[in-house]
Image (cartoon, rainbow, N blue to C red):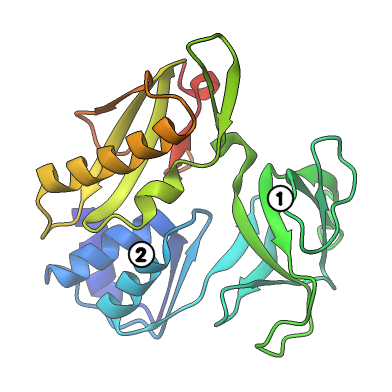
């Protein structure tokens, strides 16, 4: 991070684009006075942040923040508007919301995943590739005036964790990341399922936050949701290490047991 800050201070970019988790860390560096850049536009990509996270980036850089929805298979799928929707570049790409059996899901209903077809790639066309993202397509026109199809990304199908109950039944819990997104003082986090009934939380608190207080708030939110699903026997512990990015540089917020093993 120190080298990246130094290079950015030398280059002074007008446009800042990168993984959302890296943009959040750079915003913290700007607030701390170590980074001194004035980008006109910041484009966090590939990972989701809470609205507070995007607002923090905008305040740190005094810049507009626009989100983009991209993937390695298609780098120009959609761009966000001021009303919080992504508008699909449907003249370049086809996105198909589908259920778990790959049947079409109508607008207004959340999909299990989404299929992408990239017809603009002349070297290697991508046809109906499963991205693993859950999306919601807006059923009516977006108030921003953009006529292109509007979607919201609800998270990844893999973000839904499954736990055994004390009776041996399986219970699926919606993304636990939503419970941490609004906790004050959380810069980055990662929830890792290390055993069928065990979670470890990797935290990177904000520089001005009390780590112990942040952890107590995070622990309270997670255990509250688990208890609502009858999963009070699931343990939630604080990891000693901070969030760990993948080999590609992304920082997944939820890592299920099958991937953490």
Could you tell me if residue 4 is visible in this image?
yes
Name the mark on residue 141.
Answer: none
Q: Which of 224 and 131 lies nearest the eye of the viewer?
A: 224
191 sits left or right of 136 in the view: left
Residue 20, image x, y percentages: 43, 59
Q: Earlier in the sequence, mark 2 or mark 1?
A: 2
State the separation of the CA atoms marked 2 and 1. 26 Å
Question: Circle 1 sits in a helix, a strand or a loop, which is it?
Answer: loop
Q: Which of 119 and 128 lies nearest the eye of the viewer?
A: 128
Residue 81, image x, y percentages: 59, 80
Pointers 2 and 1 in contact (C-beta within 8 Å): no
Name the mark on residue 73.
Answer: 1
Q: Residue at x 30, y 74 (%)?
A: 11
> Which mark lies nearer to you, 2 or 1?
2
75 sits left or right of 120 in the view: left
Q: Find disc 2 in the rendering and name its residue.
A: 53
Image: 68 above or below 161: below
Residue 75, image x, y percentages: 66, 60
| Mark 1 Cα-neighbour bin, 10 Å: few <14, some 14–19, many ≥20 | some
Q: Residue at x 59, y 35 (%)?
A: 158
Q: Residue at x 27, y 67 (%)?
A: 27
Residue 84, image x, y percentages: 56, 74
């Amino acid at each position: 991070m120190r080298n990246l800050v130094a290079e950015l201070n030398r280059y002074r970019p007008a446009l800042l684009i990168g993984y959302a988790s890296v943009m959040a860390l750079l915003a913290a560096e700007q607030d701390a006075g170590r980074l001194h850049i004035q980008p006109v536009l910041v484009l966090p990509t590939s990972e989701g942040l809470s609205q507070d996270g995007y607002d923090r980036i905008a305040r740190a850089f005094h810049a507009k923040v626009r989100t983009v929805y991209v993937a390695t298979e298609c780098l120009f799928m959609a761009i966000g508007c001021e009303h919080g929707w992504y508008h699909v570049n449907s003249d370049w790409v086809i996105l198909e919301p589908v259920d778990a059996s790959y049947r079409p899901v109508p607008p207004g209903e959340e999909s299990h995943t989404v299929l992408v077809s990239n017809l603009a790639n002349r070297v290697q066309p991508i046809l109906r590739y499963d991205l693993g993202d859950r999306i919601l397509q807006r059923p009516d026109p977006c108030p921003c005036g953009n006529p292109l199809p509007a979607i919201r990304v609800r998270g990844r199908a893999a973000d839904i964790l499954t736990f055994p109950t004390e009776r041996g039944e399986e219970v699926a819990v919606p993304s636990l990341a939503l419970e941490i997104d609004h906790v004050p003082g959380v810069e980055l986090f990662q929830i890792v399922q290390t055993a069928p009934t065990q979670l470890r939380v990797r935290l990177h608190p904000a520089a001005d936050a009390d780590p112990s207080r942040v952890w107590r708030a995070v622990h309270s939110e997670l255990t509250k949701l688990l208890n609502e699903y009858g999963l009070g026997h699931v343990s939630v512990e604080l990891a000693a290490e901070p969030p760990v990015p993948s080999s590609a540089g992304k920082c997944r917020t939820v890592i299920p047991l099958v991937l953490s093993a």
